Amino acid sequence: MREYDLVDARLAARLAALRAEHGWSLDDLAERTGVSRSTLSRAERAEISPTAATLNRLCHVYGRTMSRLLGEVEGEPAPLLRAAEQPRWEDRASGFVRRSVSPPHPGLRGELVEGRLTAGADLAYDRPPVPGLEQHLWVLEGTLDVTAGDTEHRLEEGDCLRLRVWGATRFRCPGPEAVRYLLAVVLP
C-alpha cells in the first residue's frame, strides 16, 4: 500500500470518528459543510480521497487546521522528523501535494507545511479552517498567485507573504512550471 493510500484510510476513519463525537448524522454534516452527503459518506469509507477544499470545510466545522487533522491520522509526533518520514497527502483532483515538515502537536501553535501545485492548479477555500489563522507563505520554486479576500498577490521564487486569514483564499500556479512553497501556520 502506498503511503498516501494508508493516510487516506486513516483519514477516513478519523473523519467518521469526528462526526460520531459530535453526534451528527451525515445529513447534519452535509448541511454544516455544504458538501454532499454522498461525498461525505464515500470519504468516510475511504472510497474517495477528499479534495483540499472539502477537507478545509470539514476542518472548519471541527475547529481544526488541516495540518492538525492530518497530524491526528499520521501517528504520534516526534521531536525530530526525518525527510523520508514526513507524511505526504495528495489531492489528485487538483494537483496539490502537501507534506507535513514539522509534526503538529496539540500543545504548540505553529507548524510548517510544504505545498506543491502543478502548473495550472487552482485551489479555492471558501473560509479558513480556523478564523484568524496566521500564515507565512515562502515560495521556494516557481510562481504562486494568492488571493486573500479582495487582495491579490503574485509571489515569485524567494518572496514571502504573511497574512491573517479571515475569509476566502485562493492559491493558483500560473505556470509554466510547478510551484513549491513553504507554509508556516500559526494558530491565533
Image (cartoon, helix red, strand yellow):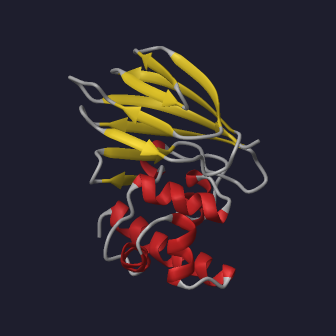
Report the quarter where the C terminus lies.
top right
Q: Quadrant of residue 157?
A: top left
Pick whichever, 38 or 104, lies toward us: 38
Quadrant where the image shows the N terminus:
bottom left
Q: Residue 161, percent across and down? A: 56, 21
Residue shown at 44%/78% (left/top)?
A: 44
Relative to 151, say whether 75 is above or below.
Answer: below
Could you tell me residue 166's position as x and y percent? 65, 39
Q: Which residue is depicted at the point 35% across and 20% down? A: 143
Q: Residue at x 53, y 40 (%)?
A: 168
For the question of whether residue 88 can be seen, the reply is: no
- Give the total number of marks visible in the rendering: 0
Residue 70: give x, y in percent of width and height: 53, 59
The residue lying toward the viewer, choosing from 31 and 187, is 31
Instruction: Point out residue 65 in the picture as x, y percentages from the top left corner.
Output: 62, 52
Is 68 situated left or right of 40 in this image?
right
Answer whether residue 149 is visible to the viewer in this image: yes
Residue at position x 63%, y 57% from top? 77
Against 67, residue 32 (above or below) is below
